[in-house]
Amino acid sequence: MAFWLIDDHTPGYGLMLRIDRTVYSEQTPYQHLAIVDTTEFGRALVLDGIIQTTVADEFIYHEMIAHVPLFTHPQPRHVLIIGGGDGGTAREVLKHSSVERIDLVEIDASVVNACRKYLPETACAFDDPRVNVIYGDGVEYVRQRRNLYDVVIVDSSDPVGPAVELFGREFYSNVYACLKENGVFVAQTDSPTFSKDLFQRVYHDIKSIFPVTMVYLTCIPSYITGFWSFTLGSKSYHPLKDFREDPEVETRYYTPQLHQACFVLPKSIEKLLAE
Amino acid sequence: MAFWLIDDHTPGYGLMLRIDRTVYSEQTPYQHLAIVDTTEFGRALVLDGIIQTTVADEFIYHEMIAHVPLFTHPQPRHVLIIGGGDGGTAREVLKHSSVERIDLVEIDASVVNACRKYLPETACAFDDPRVNVIYGDGVEYVRQRRNLYDVVIVDSSDPVGPAVELFGREFYSNVYACLKENGVFVAQTDSPTFSKDLFQRVYHDIKSIFPVTMVYLTCIPSYITGFWSFTLGSKSYHPLKDFREDPEVETRYYTPQLHQACFVLPKSIEKLLAE
């Protein structure tokens, strides 16, 4: 008998992953959490039935969400991660020697606990003394902070369930305010294939707040359609004109050349953003 | 009741598309052919259960397989397409005013007939007098031709069923020989995620024959994992140093900037190709 996980948050499309074993499963106060071993992508974190992280390709997502904004900033010292309870984004941020402190605001302590136990490849970051975990609501957290961070990374789940407000204009305004003078912000902004309206709205909301707003793309095989977007807002630094290189930061996916290439958008996506 | 197509040629992964209607279905001498209306991607051609072309995103695949080699060549006049029975690649090639003739060698006449009837968006190319359709075996065809083409495009299905030999070293040698002195060749080379061995072998085979060999990537949402590769072999022209622009060629996806960006490989893919 074979068990399959079906990631089907779009009605007419599903991504099926064969499950060799359910390692852990819990209904938390916020969502359904499962840790499973998949045949093709190794161990995975699944929230409300949606793949969040797989051992086989998590490095793509985590490197792209972390290194693009961190290399855009000349000297990131204080970083805020909203979400990111699997620890993968923090692991990548910690590779930058300028980083003195990461505040990671995760709403669901169960995510961190389960990942520490079952996904040590990503959760290793939580053992670093520079990482300060705060269990709470990211929306509320940024509302109460001002002028504190060089980089803010919104590493949330999709805009269903607990993450809905992390895709709203008011939240982005508060992110702007909690950044220091030359701060840089990035958010994962879903697949442009099935979330066209969201993708457009989020881009325009961020663009109405940040002087520099740019979308970049990558391909994450274990996510629906593979095609994935990130939206970057910056108070002054430009991700193509101001980005720096640091060969000391070891990566498996990101390169300085890819940093530049990922901002080159297909004509159909340019058109979508111009509408 | 809902019908679903499951594209599952990898054991532990499946891409499910909801089918609103089966428009046409036939067991041809070569493969099972179906034309279906999908909920998310519109009308689609399916061969042996694998998605080949959907109305919603066929432009990505067809523009990337056609324009990258055609813009690498300074004046492509004679083009050979192996496979490509849906007509989409020919449609893109015809946008180049220098093209005088396309020979399209498709093994399965049923593919062309079904697409002419049910997928006119792609099959419109067959009405153009510059397109010469030959029903036959592409492997045999290139074995018997010498020094004829400026560009050869291998727009085949995956290396299962009738397309297996189109991924072999002997075939690539014959492609080299049927190209003119400065000819350019490209093949779709599957998803690097699940076809690592094939992807590596094909790259090394082509590299052992063509002086210039380069891989480029794109993301095709209706294909498994989204992540898709093409491998280009060239006798002399370099796709980054020699490519030209022509604003007369109208596209929905391809841009000259994307032409350059698609050759920037993630470190993990560079590593795979260096092995």
Image (cartoon, coloured by chain):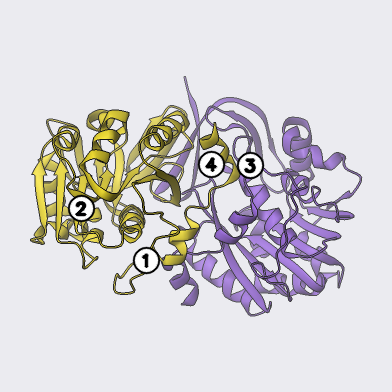
Chain colours: A yellow, B purple
Seen at 76% across and 73% down, the residue is B176
Q: CA distance from mark 1 to mark 4?
A: 35 Å
- Amino acid type, label 3: Glu
Mark 1 Cα-neighbour bin, 10 Å: few <14, some 14–19, many ≥20: some
- Amino acid type, label 4: Ser
Secondary element under disc 2, as helix, strand or loop, is strand
Q: Nearer the viewer, mark 1 or mark 3?
A: 1
Q: Residue A165 — which label?
A: none
Secondary element under disc 3, as helix, strand or loop, is helix
Q: CA distance from mark 3 to mark 4?
A: 9 Å
The residue pinned by badge 2 equals A79
Q: Residue B222 — which label?
A: 4
Mark 1 vs mark 2: which is more N-terminal?
2
Q: Quadrant of the C terminus of chain A?
A: top right
Secondary element under disc 4, as helix, strand or loop, is loop
Q: CA distance from mark 1 to mark 3?
A: 37 Å
